[in-house]
Image: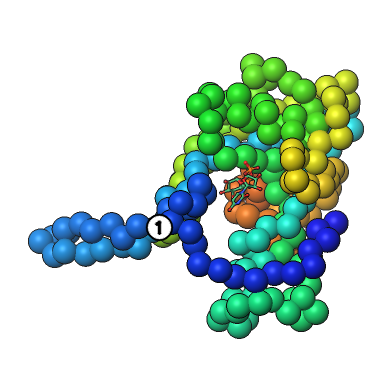
């Protein structure tokens, strides 16, 4: 699905619209300290449950940062990736539908748009319920993420999803036993903590009782 033919690293341009690095200084207990950090966009993530099929709707995509992380855990650093030793599939994740907050719209409206763009379901904002808000990357970015829950039916399906412009996103449906297995065994698909936490929240609060017994 990822169709990646070349990967290399370069320096971060100062005008990156996605990542701004800073060194923050502070005085604690009378001692001057500093912390190197990244300003990244806040984001939304949506736990999407199709009640017609009793399936959780997730997305699969190549994540450059995960691919970089997998290689550098092994090699320390690299300039040009060896695609034979490190096939791009190792950078593919299974996640909740999500998106960055990079426009002046309400967070739930941004969540609504992501559900439509990435997963193809057209729902109104009032059907999207806020679940929790937390900070991710507490050592590096401290970015805020708001998690939402939304139930959809087959009748809400407006397109096949997959993202906008050149995004390559695959929509994946998981049955309730598959979701349960996923949280029992952990992140075999490079799934981020927010995804596992969202699925656990679903199992604890929304899943039909028969799906969580046994
Ligand atoms: O360096 C970058 C970074 C982003 N993009 C684009 O920006 C958009 C970002 O995608 P979007 O779907 O809005 O957000 P996500 O990539 O899904 O990321 C959010 O959701 C993730 C899963 O919860 C969190 O890990 C992230 O921190 C959070 O930003 C996409 O079009 C990307 O192609 C770039 O082109 N270059």
Label 1 sits on residue: 21
> Badge 1: few (under 14), some or many (20 or more) residues near its Cα, within 10 Å?
some
> Which sits in the foreground, 181 or 153?
153
Coloring scheme of the render? rainbow
> What is the x, y in percent for residue 116?
75, 29
Residue at 74 percent of width and 38 percent of height: 164
Q: Position of residue 146 (x, y in %)?
A: 54, 36
- The quarter of the displayed image where residue 115 is located: top right
Q: Nearer the viewer, residue 57 or 53?
A: 57
80 versus 37 height, above or below:
below
Q: Where does residue 75 sit, x and y in percent of width and height?
A: 61, 83
Q: Quadrant of the N terminus?
A: bottom right
**Could you tell me which residue is drawn at 70 percent across and 40 percent down?**
97
Vertical arrangement, residue 47 with respect to residue 30, above or below: above
Depth check: 113 or 11 in front? 11
Horizontal placement of 68 versus 18: left or right?
Answer: right
- Classify mark 1: helix, strand or loop: strand
Point 78% across, 72% down: residue? 87
For residue 99, say whether it is visible: yes
Q: Is residue 208 visible?
A: no
Q: Residue at x 68, y 58 (%)?
A: 63
* Residue 122 x, y percent position in the rendering: 77, 23
Q: Of 191 and 35, which appears nearest the observer?
A: 35
């Amino acid at each position: 699905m990822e169709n990646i033919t070349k990967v290399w690293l370069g320096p971060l341009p100062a005008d990156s619209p996605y990542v701004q690095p800073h060194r923050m200084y502070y005085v604690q207990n009378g001692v001057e300290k500093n912390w190197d950090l990244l300003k990244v966009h806040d984001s939304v993530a949506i736990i999407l449950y199709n009640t017609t099929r009793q399936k959780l709707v997730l997305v699969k995509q190549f994540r450059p940062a995960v691919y970089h992380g997998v290689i550098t855990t092994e090699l320390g650093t690299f300039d040009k990736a060896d695609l034979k030793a490190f096939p791009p599939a190792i950078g593919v994740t299974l996640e909740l539908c999500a998106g960055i907050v990079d426009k002046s719209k309400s967070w739930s409206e941004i969540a609504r748009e992501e559900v439509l763009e990435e997963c193809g379901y057209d729902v109104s904002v009032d059907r999207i319920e806020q679940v929790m808000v937390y900070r991710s990357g507490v050592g590096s970015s401290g970015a805020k993420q708001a998690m939402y829950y939304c139930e959809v039916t087959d009748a809400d399906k407006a397109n096949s999803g997959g993202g906008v412009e050149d995004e390559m996103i695959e929509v994946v449906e998981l049955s309730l036993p598959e979701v349960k297995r996923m949280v029992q065994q952990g992140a075999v698909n490079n799934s981020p903590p927010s995804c596992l936490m969202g699925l656990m929240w679903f199992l604890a609060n929304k899943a039909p009782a028969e799906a969580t017994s046994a």
